[in-house]
Image (cartoon, rainbow, N blue to C red):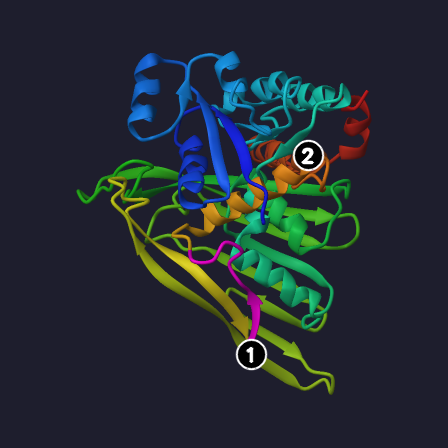
């Protein structure tokens, strides 16, 4: 019998509600408390069946195993550092928007805080499947990647994931940003059908790693929700490549082969008034050449790919909080991602290449 994943949430905004939906969907997950700042927000959460409180003491009295920190970015690092003195913490990304915030988190961990970061993209079904194709050795050691899938620190995490790069791998980064007029279609809370146009940023960055590998980051700020902006994943190894859902490789006789990654989905409809959650696809399995390379860990639970990935992190966090498992995403890894995002934006602003100094800075942060 599985142990229940018992957690509380600090915050009650957009991201916090992902965790609340997971707790409602999965019987082995229990949201013990949500810490709200205002009485009206507390009442709204209670109307939705969420145990909400206004004080830390009330939340702690529910005996959670760990705290999820899901406040706004400007307060994320400070709040996570503070709560890590009380409970193990799974903090939302990023692990710092500048070097000062990164140092604050590093100090909190050095002082004994248990801090994990909810960098969920590596737990996406499609990325788990992609990595398992690597592990089969079909395309050989990957050395080049072009990623247009996730922004900033998330993108950096996936670049390192697919290129098998430790967090202290040094690199040179160059970047450029543009703003292009784009029709807006969907925000976090509503759908637009009036054809409104706004300038949206596209960032292009090239990471040249010290071990000879290279990664291209290419992301448009509309990609997460817009139906007219798609994702791209291109990975090349010594024996083949993956471009989105198509794999090309050489077999044991060095003869060319190709196949499509088959992603099975089912359409989920809910009563959620938010257009982002009223209808979506749930991944029910992924296979390559008839071999199953991904099975949903919680079955068909009515969760999106993002929610399923977060649920995986929550489950791993329970084990880590109880001293029975590894950190689902160590702070050092997340700091490397945030550091890469900081350097990328700095390179774009300065219009020049920047050489990383992660090891040197890490020695300062960890003192």
Residue that mark 1 sits on: 289
Residue at left 67%, top 49%? 160
Residue 258 is at least partly visible in this image:
yes
In the picture as drawn, the residue positioned furthest to the front comes out as: 1
Figure label count = 2
- Give coordinates of residue 272: x percent, y percent: 27, 41
Q: Residues in magenta?
A: 290-300
The crowd level at tag 2 (other Cα within 10 Å; few <14, some 14-19, many 20+) is few
Quadrant of the drawing holding the C terminus: top right
- Give coordinates of residue 154: x percent, y percent: 56, 42
Q: Secondary structure of the magenta portion, mostly?
A: loop
In the picture as drawn, the residue positioned furthest to the left comes out as: 194
- Give coordinates of residue 186: x percent, y percent: 29, 42
Residue that mark 2 sits on: 322
State the SS at label 1. loop
Discs 1/2, front: 2
121 with respect to 240 (left or right): left
């Amino acid at each position: 019998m599985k142990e229940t994943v018992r957690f509380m949430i600090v915050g009650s905004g957009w991201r916090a509600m992902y965790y609340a939906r997971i707790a409602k969907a999965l019987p082995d997950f229990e949201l013990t408390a949500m810490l709200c700042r205002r009485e009206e927000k507390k009442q709204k959460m209670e109307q939705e069946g969420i145990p909400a409180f206004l004080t830390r003491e009330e939340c702690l009295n529910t005996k959670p195993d760990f705290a999820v920190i899901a406040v706004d970015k400007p307060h994320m690092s400070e709040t996570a550092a503070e709560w890590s003195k009380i409970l193990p913490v799974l903090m939302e990304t990023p692990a710092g928007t500048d070097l000062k915030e990164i140092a604050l988190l590093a100090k909190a961990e050095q002082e004994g805080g248990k801090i994990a970061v909810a960098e969920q993209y590596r737990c996406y079904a499609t990325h788990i499947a992609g990595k398992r194709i690597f592990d089969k050795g079909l395309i050989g050691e990957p050395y080049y990647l072009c990623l247009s899938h996730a922004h900033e620190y998330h993108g950096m995490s996936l670049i390192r994931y697919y290129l098998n790069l430790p967090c202290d791998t040094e690199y040179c980064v160059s970047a450029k940003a543009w703003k292009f007029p784009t029709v807006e279609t969907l925000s976090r809370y509503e759908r637009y059908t009036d054809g409104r146009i706004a300038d949206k940023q596209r960032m292009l960055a090239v990471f040249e790693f010290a071990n000879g590998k290279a990664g291209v980051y290419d992301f448009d700020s509309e990609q997460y929700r817009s139906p007219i902006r798609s994702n791209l994943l291109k990975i090349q190894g010594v024996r083949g490549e993956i471009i989105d859902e198509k794999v090309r490789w050489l077999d044991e006789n060095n003869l060319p082969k190709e196949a499509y990654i088959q992603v099975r989905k089912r359409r989920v409809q809910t009563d959620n008034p938010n257009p982002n959650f009223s209808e979506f696809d749930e991944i029910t399995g992924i296979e390559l050449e008839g071999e199953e390379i991904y099975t949903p860990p919680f079955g068909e639970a009515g969760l999106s790919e993002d929610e399923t990935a977060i649920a995986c992190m929550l489950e791993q966090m329970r084990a880590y909080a109880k001293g029975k498992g590894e950190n689902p995403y160590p702070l050092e890894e997340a700091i490397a991602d945030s550091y890469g995002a900081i350097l990328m934006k700095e390179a774009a602003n300065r219009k020049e290449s920047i050489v990383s100094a992660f090891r040197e800075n890490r020695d300062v942060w960890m003192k």
